[in-house]
Structure formats: C-alpha cells, structure tokens
Amino acid sequence: MHCLTRIDRSAWIVGLVGLGGCQIPNPAFGLERDSDSDGVSVSAATTEPVLTTSTDPGTTDEPATGPGTSTTGELPLSTGVDTEDTGTGPAPSSCGDNVLDPGEECDDGDGIDGNDCTNHCTLAKCGDGIVHEGQEACDGGDADDPSCTPMCTLAECGDGIKTGSEQCDDGNTDAFDGCTADCELSCNDGVFEPDREECDPSDPVFGDVLALCSETCELKSCFRMTNTEDKDLAGPDWFEACATAPGERIAVLLRDPAGVQYLRFGLKPPSMFAWNPSDMTSTKPPADQWKFASHDRKVELTDLLFDKPEPLVDVLYAFGDDSQPKASEAATCPSSLGDGYALAIAPAGQTTHARLLLMPFAGNTMPRNLGGWLATGPGVELAFSGAPMPLCSADDPPTPFLGAVAIAVF
C-alpha cells in the first residue's frame, strides 16, 4: 500500500491507493509519523486517543448506551473531536477515532485542533482559519483580517503586502519610488517633498513644467547615473541621448540618501542653430568650445528647491561631442572641459570655478587636466559642492558627489 502526498502553496493533497488507509503526516509543519499495517498510527499522541464506541455488527445484542454511542444504528460522532474547533462543515462521523477512514485526510484522535491534523480530520494549511502553533503567527481563514497576511504571518510595513491602514507596501526602504519606508504614498499629494520624491506633478511648482515630472514623481530623464567611489561613466558618449533629445528646456537633478540636493531647470535661448551633439550651449568651432566665454547659448537655471535658495544665478555649459581644445592651449585651465561631452554648472560670471561637474576622466582624445581631477579618485566623475569648486587648483580638488544625477531635456 502506498500513501501519496503532494504539496502546493496552500494545502496538501492526499491520495489513498490500495485497501484501507494510513495516517498521512504534514511535512510542511516539520512533523513525522509512521503507520502500521492496519492503518493505525503508532506515533506518540499528545493525549490518549478517544475511540468511537458502537454496536458490534456481528452480534444481536442491544446497542450500548451512554455518551458517544448511537441508538439509531448510525456511526456516532467521536468524543475525541473538539467541539470548539474552527473548521467549516461537519467532520466525518468517524473523525477522531485515530483511524484513517474514507473521506478523511488524516486522523490523529488527539482532540487538538492546532497541530498538523485538525479536528475535522483535514491536513493543516494556511487559510483554514486555525492557527497552527509553531508554524503560523495567525490565520484569518476566509475573513478579511488586516492584521494577518495570506501567508499566515503578522502584517507589517515592509513585507510587500498592503494591509490595514498602509497606503502602500512595496517591500523596500527606498523613499524615492512612490512608497516610503513607513508605507505612505509620497507622490501626487500636492506637495513637493525633496526628501521623498524627485518632483511632484501635482505641486504648483511644477505647474508649467509638467513634462519634467512623471506620475511616479520621478524626473523624466534622458540620462541617469548613480555615482559611486568606482568608475561609473562607461565612455565619452555618455551624453548622446540628451544631445539628440528634442526640447527647449533642460533640467539637472542631484539626489543622495538624504534627498534632492540640487534641482534646477532653464530655457534654451532662441537660436538659428539647433540643439545637437556638436552645438548645445556653444555654436563656436569645436576647438574653441572648451572656453567658457565661447558658449553663446548658455542656459541660466532656475531653482526648484525653494527651501534651499541660492543667491547666485547658475549657468549651465554643455560641451559638444567633438569639442576639443587646440594643442597649443591644452595646458591652459580648464581646457580639458571641452574634450568631448562634459557638463559644467557655474555661478554667473565665474570662469575658473564650478558648482557642478559631470564628465568621464578621459574625453575623446585626452584625459581631463583639471586640478586634482585624477588624483581625487574615480568617484569625482560627478563633482558637486554648494560652494563653487576651483577648477585648476590641485590643492583644492573637486568634491565627489556620491549619489544619483539625472538630466532631462524636454
């Protein structure tokens, strides 16, 4: 005789093959039992099983009377069944006699509803409304219980299941994905919160720049990178998607674990020249683009972080893909800004200091020769400081910004 068991997520399915039956354990609950040849469990029960009493079918005597007996010729209910069990529907008439009979998944006869065999002679499973000790923290059954998950674990913020008073639950602690670490929605509530979102299209601040912000309160970017202490920019073509993107405005965002640290946007001034990989904020020949003074389309940036006002106006310089300093001027600071794609944001009127720099170490033909650029380490691919950083002082190198940068052209 064989006893076949099969597991799925919510239950055990038991098949009986051959004559008679055997008591089937529920390995999902870490219990093991054996059965003898007669189908009666030989495992130790926590209490003595109460066997059903009935008339011996081989005699003509009057049926016995008393608790647990039947005077109608039908099999009586076992006195081993807990009358307080929470199962649904009637139990088989022989349930609780410690013998596996047809219609029963198990029968341990111990009268305990919270182990691997219930008092309805069904195998324990999550969702049956019975809390199985040591295996489940709760079991709401078919009821809508906000304190209990469908996996029979106590609901808590961060388990990836929205329950109770949670507005959301995405199972992570990232504060910038629309659901905060305390399971609150942080997007489209009418207020831009830089510590929880990159932007918010429902905030009046973004009323005239809706193309900048997605419905999930993330900047719609043509370039995005998380800068670490290692090398993160793959090559000098990093800005290609932004250089070929249509649009009349550009925005730059910096964000670290504490929140958005920099968010400004500006209008590209009208020009007979289109924004393209060669001519972005400068229409001069490539050999002259490394000079700040050669950028005749520089973009003045407006601050969108009203709680971090900047008294100075920032100016964005985007250096074209084929920009390259003259060989005779290669040692002039800051000539290597113009060797392929680079982004610099400087206070208005500054030509030797910048607030933000973004570029790979090597351009199309040569390494960057900014003061201290290489010596600072790989993380300086993205440099940012609230105070303008000197571009040519090896004693005061640019400050690496370890966080995310996003650029949008819209």
Image (cartoon, grey):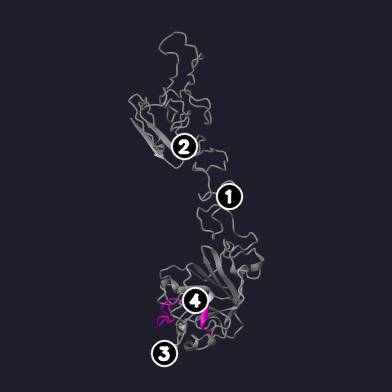
Q: Is residue 260 visible?
A: yes
Residue 163 % position (x, y): 56, 47
Question: Callout 3 environment at 10 Å: few (<14), some (14 to 19), or many (20+)?
Answer: few
Residue 55 % position (x, y): 45, 13
Q: Which residues are magenta?
A: 351-373
Q: Earlier in the sequence, mark 4 or mark 2?
A: 2
Q: Amino acid at mark 2?
A: Lys
34 left or right, relative to 184: left
Q: Nearer the viewer, mark 3 or mark 4?
A: 4
Q: Which mark is residue 357?
A: 4
Q: Which mark is residue 288?
A: none
Q: Which residue is mark 3?
A: 327
Q: What is the spatial separation of the Cα atoms under label 3 and label 4, in whole angstroms?
A: 23 Å
Q: Is residue 353 magenta?
A: yes
Which quarter shows the N terminus?
top left
Q: Which residue is mark 2?
A: 125
Local secondary structure at mark 1: loop
Q: What is the spatial separation of the Cα atoms under label 4 and label 1, in whole angstroms?
A: 41 Å
Q: Nearer the viewer, mark 4 or mark 2?
A: 4
Q: Amino acid at mark 1?
A: Glu
